[in-house]
Image: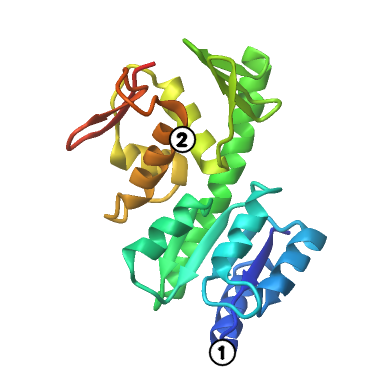
């Protein structure tokens, strides 16, 4: 059974979410503070983490940062704060998705299902890539070793977050072609386009910071204004 770790300190909301997830067939563990969340994540190795931002002991952002040091588990941030900066921070530190409170259980379940489906598809894609190409993708000076989960550029190792790696692999596989925003969100995040392209823009920005020169020089990832992005390396 798929295991989900729910981290939420509001008792009634935690109970409501847990009930609906259990009803949908998931095995649920709950934590009400950041410290307990990290302990449960370490002990239970969940398939997905639903993570509130405002938590006692350790806040959700720090929990996310900590998890990303050792795990590629899908993480969805749950936040009552509607500030764009909070959503951006969550994505920049490694969250795969975010949902702003209040939200419907129907939307939450759809997002959960999509994240888990993307995880399964990515694992299958990686397995297929390894079988067909010995786990290696290269494009000019860029080298991606899927077996070792390692990316290097001009011989220099580049540390990427799980979703950044997945996005990069997709772009490289479609190199030279324009990948529309809607297509990237659907293929990499696995859910229908909800109208907010900021999630994708933040991850593109992260890739550019790590893969492209600070001053001048050709861009590996080009923006096709009003359409999407193209890997030009």
- Please say if 152 is above or below 107: above
Q: Residue furthest right?
A: 43
- Residue farthest along the top direction in this orientation: 140
Which residue in the protein does label 1 denote? 12
Pick the front one: 79 or 58: 58
- x, y (%) of residue 36? 73, 73
Question: Which quarter of the image is occupied by the C terminus?
Answer: top left
What separation in Å lies between label 2 and label 1 (alpha carbons)? 36 Å
Q: Measured along the vertical axis of the image, is residue 159 above or below residue 51?
A: above
**183 sits left or right of 156 in the view:** left
Q: Which mark is residue 36?
A: none
Does residue 137 appear to the left or right of 134 in the view shown? left
Judge left or right: residue 190 versus residue 182.
right
Please report the residue visible at 38 percent of the width from the left and 50 percent of the height from the top.
Answer: 199
Give the structural element (helix, strand or loop) at label 1: helix
Q: Would you say 64 lies left or right of 171 here?
A: right
Residue 206, how many percent across, how many down? Answer: 43, 40
Which of marks 1 and 2 precedes in the sequence?
1
Q: Nearer the viewer, mark 2 or mark 1?
A: 2
Q: SS of the residue at dot 2?
A: helix
Residue occupying the point 64% across, 26% down: 146
Q: Which residue is mark 2?
A: 167
Q: Badge 1 local density, few (<14 within 10 Å), some, or many (20+)?
A: few
Q: Nearer the viewer, residue 232 or 173?
A: 232
Residue 99: x and y in percent read 43, 66
Q: Quadrant of residue 150?
A: top right
């Amino acid at each position: 059974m798929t295991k989900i770790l729910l981290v939420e300190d509001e008792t009634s909301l935690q109970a409501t979410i847990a009930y609906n997830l259990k009803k949908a067939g998931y095995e649920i563990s709950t934590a009400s503070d950041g410290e307990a969340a990290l302990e449960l994540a370490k002990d239970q190795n969940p398939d997905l983490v639903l993570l509130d931002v405002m938590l006692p002991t350790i806040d959700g952002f720090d929990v996310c940062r900590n998890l990303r040091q050792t795990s590629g588990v899908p993480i969805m941030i749950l936040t009552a704060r509607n500030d764009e900066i909070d959503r951006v921070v969550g994505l920049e530190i490694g969250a795969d998705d975010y949902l702003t409170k209040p939200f419907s259980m129907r939307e939450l379940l759809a997002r959960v299902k999509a994240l888990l489906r993307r995880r399964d598809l990515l694992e299958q894609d990686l397995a297929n890539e390894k079988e067909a190409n010995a786990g290696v993708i290269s494009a000019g000076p860029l080298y991606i070793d899927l077996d070792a989960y390692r990316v290097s550029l001009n011989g220099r190792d580049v540390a990427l977050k799980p979703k950044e790696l997945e996005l990069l692999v997709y772009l490289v596989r479609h190199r030279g072609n324009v990948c529309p925003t809607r297509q990237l969100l659907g293929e990499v995040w696995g859910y229908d386009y909800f109208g907010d392209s900021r999630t994708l823009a933040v991850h593109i920005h992260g890739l550019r910071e790590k893969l492209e020169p600070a001053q001048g020089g050709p861009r590996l990832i080009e923006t096709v204004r009003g359409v999407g992005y193209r890997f030009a390396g």
